[in-house]
Amino acid sequence: MCGRFCLDTPAAELISQLRPWLDHDDADWLNHYAARSLIRPQEPVLILRQEHGRARIAHVLWGLMPGWVKDPTQGPRPFNARAETLSEKASFRGPWRHHRCLIPCSSYLEKDHRIQRLDQQLFWLGGIWDRWIGSDGSEVETCCVITTEANPLVQPVHNRMPVIIPNGLEEAWLEPGDAMHRQALEPLLEPGDSQGWTRTLIARQAGSASSQQLALEGIAPFNP
C-alpha cells in the first residue's frame, strides 16, 4: 500500500519537471509552493491529469470519492486502488477508463522506511481521480494511488507498492483511449525495477507527530 509520501523537492526542480504542462494560470500556486515532508490521506495533493484534450496540473484531495455517490459524508474514501481490480470495482472502473492521473513524488514511506530514487529525482505515482458534483453545483475532486505487488526492494517491509510510471510515458498514461489502449498500459501496472532505487530506515525525532519532521538514520542502501 501507499499511505504516506513526500514532495519536498525545491520549487525550481519541480517547475523543471512540470514545465511541459504548466500554464500561465499555474503561476499563483507556484508562487506559494511549499515543500512537504509528509503527505497523508485526506490532504490536498498535486496531480497531472488530462481534461479537454490537454494535460494540466490540479490540486485534489487524496482519498477517492466516486462521482456517483449520493452522500459524500458516507462510505469509504480509499487512498489506494489495487491494480488487479481496477476494471472490476465500481469505484475504480470509471476513473480507470477515463480519469487516470500522475502524482509527483520525491519519496514514499512504508513502515518506517523511505523509498526513493538513488539520484533523489522526482518520480510519478500512477493514480486515478474523479469529480463529485453536488445538487447545489459544488464540486469535490479526489484521487487515489494505484498499488501493485511489491518488488524485491519493498518486499521486506510490505507486500504492496505504488505503481511507478516512467518518465516519457506521461501522455500515454493520461490519454483516456479505448479498451485496447488500456490493455497496452497493463505492463505499467507491474512492479517497478529495484535498480536505481534505495530504501532507508527512518528515525522519528521527538515531537515529530506534530511537526511532521523526519530524520534519516543511515543504513546501507538495499541492493537487489
Image (tube, helix red, strand yellow):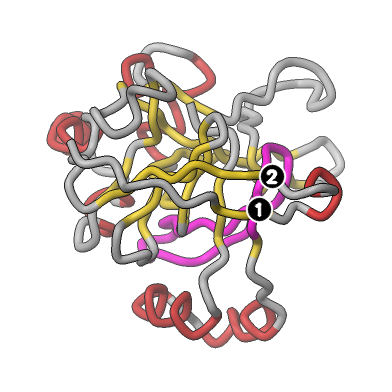
Residue at horizontal 82 percent and vertical 55 percent from the top? 211
Q: Which type of secondary structure does the marked residue at label 1 adopt? A: strand
Whole-percent x, y for residue 81 in the image: 47, 25
* Residue drawn at (56%, 44%) of the image: 202
Q: Quick check: 43 above or below 84?
A: below
Q: Earlier in the sequence, mark 2 or mark 1?
A: 2
Q: Nearer the viewer, residue 150 or 224?
A: 224
Where residue 207 sits in the image (x, y, percent)? 85, 48
The quarter holding residue 176 reads top left
Residue depicted at 65% across the width and 62% down the height: 36
Neighbours of disc 1 within 10 Å: few (<14), some (14-19), many (20+): some
**In the picture, residue 37 is in which quadrant?**
bottom right
According to the picture, the residue beneath numbered tag 2 turns out to be 204
Contact (Cβ within 8 Å) of mark 2 with mark 1: yes
The image shows residue 24 at horizontal and vertical percentages of 55, 87
Question: Mark 1 sits on what residue?
Answer: 214
Magenta segment range?
Answer: 37-60
Query: Does residue 110 belong to the magenta stretch?
Result: no
* Element assignment for label 2: strand
Count residues near mark 2 (Cα–Cα under 10 Å), then give few for <14, some for 14-19, many for 20+: some
Q: Within the magenta stretch, is there residue 54?
A: yes
**Residue type pointed to by label 2:** Arg
Count of numbered labels shown in the rendering: 2
- Assign the C terminus to one quadrant of the image: top left
The three-letter amino acid code for the residue at tag 1 is Leu
Q: Residue at x 63, y 69 (%)?
A: 35
